[in-house]
Image (spheres, rainbow, N blue to C red):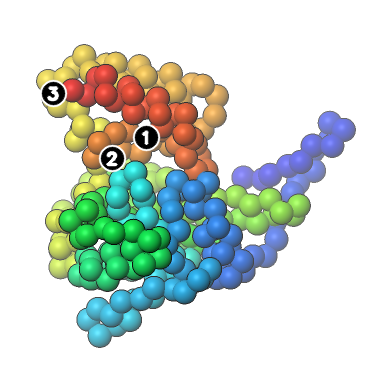
Amino acid sequence: MTIFKVKKNVLSPVSEKKLDLEKDIQKLTESNLRVLFGINFVSGASNREFSVKALEQEFYIDTLAFDESQKSFVIIEYKKDKSFSVIDQGFAYLSAMLNHKADFVLELNERLNKSFTKNDIDWEQSRIIFVSSDFTNYQRNAINFKDLPIFLYEVKLYEDDIIEFDPIKPYKTTESITRISKDLTIQRVSKEIKVYSLEDLIKPDWSESRELYEDFDRTIKNIGFETRVKFTKVYIAYMSKHGRNQSLLSVSRRFYQIIFKN
């Protein structure tokens, strides 16, 4: 999509600029994790990258973040290589985390001066975010599963220091990754990490609650700005296209408490 700027009622296209994904964008992202994703920075290029060794391979985490609201870790990787598989690498990093939980908790505690134990962390809601200046059609199609804890963000830099973080939306999310792939790493990780959907939160016989929610959902989406819906274990979050909108999140939490009761 072409971005324009307006001057005296005349549109002129905003030129895209070359960006250094591994340096400038990584540090910029780490400094603005609360704005972009509503999460807290733990470690990365801004201090010292965290790493663990799994299966004789060293896994360097570009950016390690923590979701305070869900008590879960978020791994962020920045990619220039267009040939990498978001599925293979995503599950490899998540597997390394699940096999080294104590190391991740220790890193969190030392960096943020916390005192969490492994049992305090909701490992089930762990996820990984890939950031790239350009994803291939193959990579975009690879996330078309309903239970995939992998998210893609395409970042573009324009003149006048305009930066866009565009979430890549799956075309369809009806099939489960565990039914398609028999890969042992994917199977093991999928047993510990769960991606929630509306069907997980509303029981089949809650017809009135579902009707109330659908009315609420339509109202929020018709307000006039683009939103994303995030289903978690305990609430439904409505987020702006880029980052978290606190007022919408607060409304969704209160609404959830009203209609999603046993």
Answer yes or no: is residue 229 visible.
Answer: yes
Answer yes or no: is residue 88 visible.
Answer: no
Depth check, front residue: 113 or 179: 113
Q: Disc 1 residue type?
A: Ala
| x, y percent for residue 130 | 43, 60
In the image: residue 246, left or right of residue 120: right
The C terminus appears in which quarter of the rendering? top left
Depth check, front residue: 151 or 116: 116
Q: CA distance from mark 2 to mark 3?
A: 17 Å
Nearer the N terminus, badge 2 or badge 3?
A: 2
Q: CA distance from mark 2 to mark 1?
A: 8 Å
According to the image, label 3 marks what residue? 262
Classify mark 3: residues with Cα within 10 Å, few (<14), some (14-19) or many (20+): few
| x, y percent for residue 154 | 52, 55
Q: Which residue: 76% across, 52% down? A: 160
Q: Quadrant of residue 188?
A: bottom left
| x, y percent for residue 144 | 32, 49
The N terminus appears in which quarter of the rendering? top right
Secondary structure at badge 3 equals loop
| x, y percent for residue 167 | 47, 48
Classify mark 1: residues with Cα within 10 Å, few (<14), some (14-19) or many (20+): many
In this rendering, the count of numbered labels is 3
Nearer the N terminus, badge 1 or badge 3?
A: 1
Q: Disc 3 residue type?
A: Asn
Depth check, front residue: 41 or 188: 41
Secondary structure at badge 1 equals strand
Q: Which residue: 84% across, 31% down? A: 9
Q: Which residue: 31% across, 76% down? A: 52
According to the image, label 1 marks what residue? 237
In the image: residue 251, left or right of residue 198: right
According to the image, label 2 marks what residue? 232
Residue 202 against residue 150 in the figure, above or below = above
